[in-house]
Image (tube, grey):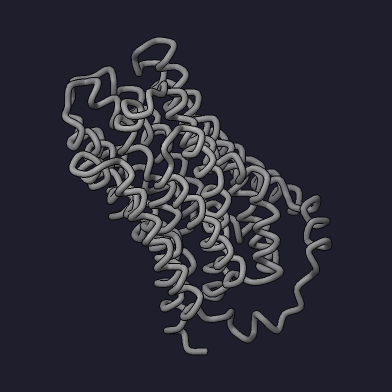
Amino acid sequence: MKYQEHWKVLVYIYFFTLVFALTFQSIPPLLGFLVQSLGISHTQAGALMSLFGLPGILISIPGGILADVYGPKRVGITALLITLIGSLLVGLGKNYSLLLTGRIISGIGGLTISIVAPQALSRWFASRDLGKAMGIFNTAMPLGSIFTLNTFSVLAGIYTWQIPLLLTSFFCLGVLILFYFRYPELPDEIRRQKQPEFKEKVLTLRKTGPQVWLVAAIWMMYNASTISYLTFGADYYQYAGYDVNYANFLTSLLMVGSLLFSPLVGTLTDRVGRKEYFIIVGSIAIALLLYFVPRTLFNPIIIGGLIGFFAASIPSPVFSLVPKYISLAQVGLGYGILSTCLNIGILLGPLLVGFSYDQTQNYLVGFDLMAIFALFTALITLLLLLLNRLESGNQA
């Protein structure tokens, strides 16, 4: 198969991932509209983000194993269909219970997408340019987030908050059709490899090394921090006196950095390695910046831009580390573990930050929590480096 085919697959995977990004990030720009329209608390609003990740805690590892066994196309089509059903329920929902149910259903599909996409890329790009492919792939989430944060509140203000949610459903439908008819099967050399049955794959879970779980814990803490910021950042900036559209723009700067610099980070990690050092430097910087957001009068555009710049140094290295610690045949399982911990971060981060606001009626404690999550990202990465050095010393 010609190498150009790999890059065509990346285009399909990119649109595939945009479905997850748009579905997941559809709530933060509509937070104020939902609180006002449905009469809900900030804890309940945070739950619309948090409970999106709840099913992923249970289904991520089985979903990763299924992607290994049955291939990304079959599992991906099923995930898109489930996401479409859930997003339609959210867009057509008239009360909080329906929205919550729809978010949980769309979470099942969306988070399966987040496993299938990197698993597919790891197999298509196993021989070369994995870091570069992951760098490009990791701009999909920022692009979707920037789009939702800067357009959904405008659409909600002109029409109703249901309109942007329904547009997300139509986009999901379009990608489902594209994926069904155009996405190619895996290369022949990969499909010819004998894949263990589902039960055998489950049994191998016990044999995964601690490094895979540490990488997953890094991803959990990073997302607990950044998803909390994306969920409540705009609400904080409105609380600080900015209008809703500018507040959403300031929050979206986190993702602008990732959109611009993730491909560069992916290329650099291909050339120089040292993925863990990118994560450590980026997460420490994010922790300091988040701590100072509610405590300084410094230009919020500069602080937001710096958060985005340093946030770009983490996703590509994390996704590229998974194939380093698990075999290619089990890489879906590896990303399933990653997604499980991601969803724990999604569940706990916004829920705790929303609860802290309801208790204190300000965001000081909430930003402290975000900074602590980011700091733990660096500490776990240091532990991973230490474990690698200990194993290298024992082997020597």
Is residue 177 toward the left or the right of residue 304 in the image? right
Image location (x, y in percent) of residue 330 = 69, 63
Image location (x, y in percent) of residue 35 = 35, 27
Image location (x, y in percent) of residue 39 = 37, 23
Q: Is residue 44 visible?
A: yes
Q: Is residue 381 visible?
A: no
Q: Is residue 256 above or below residue 124?
A: above
- For residue 195, what is the image quadrant? bottom right
Q: Residue at x 25, y 21 (%)?
A: 239
How many marks overall? 0
Closer to the camera in the image, 255 or 76:
76
Q: Residue at x 65, y 57 (%)?
A: 63
Extreme residue toward the front, this view:
94
Q: Residue at x 34, y 14 (%)?
A: 362
Q: Residue at x 29, y 48 (%)?
A: 146
Closer to the camera in the image, 3 or 81:
81
Q: Is residue 20 above or below residue 130?
A: above
- For residue 228, what is the image quadrant? top left
Is residue 212 toward the left or the right of residue 357 in the image? right
Extreme residue toward the bottom, this view:
1
Q: Is residue 361 above or below residue 212?
A: above
- For residue 361, what is the image quadrant? top left
Image location (x, y in percent) of residue 190 = 65, 80
Is residue 337 toward the left or the right of residue 124 in the image? right
Closer to the camera in the image, 126 or 21:
21
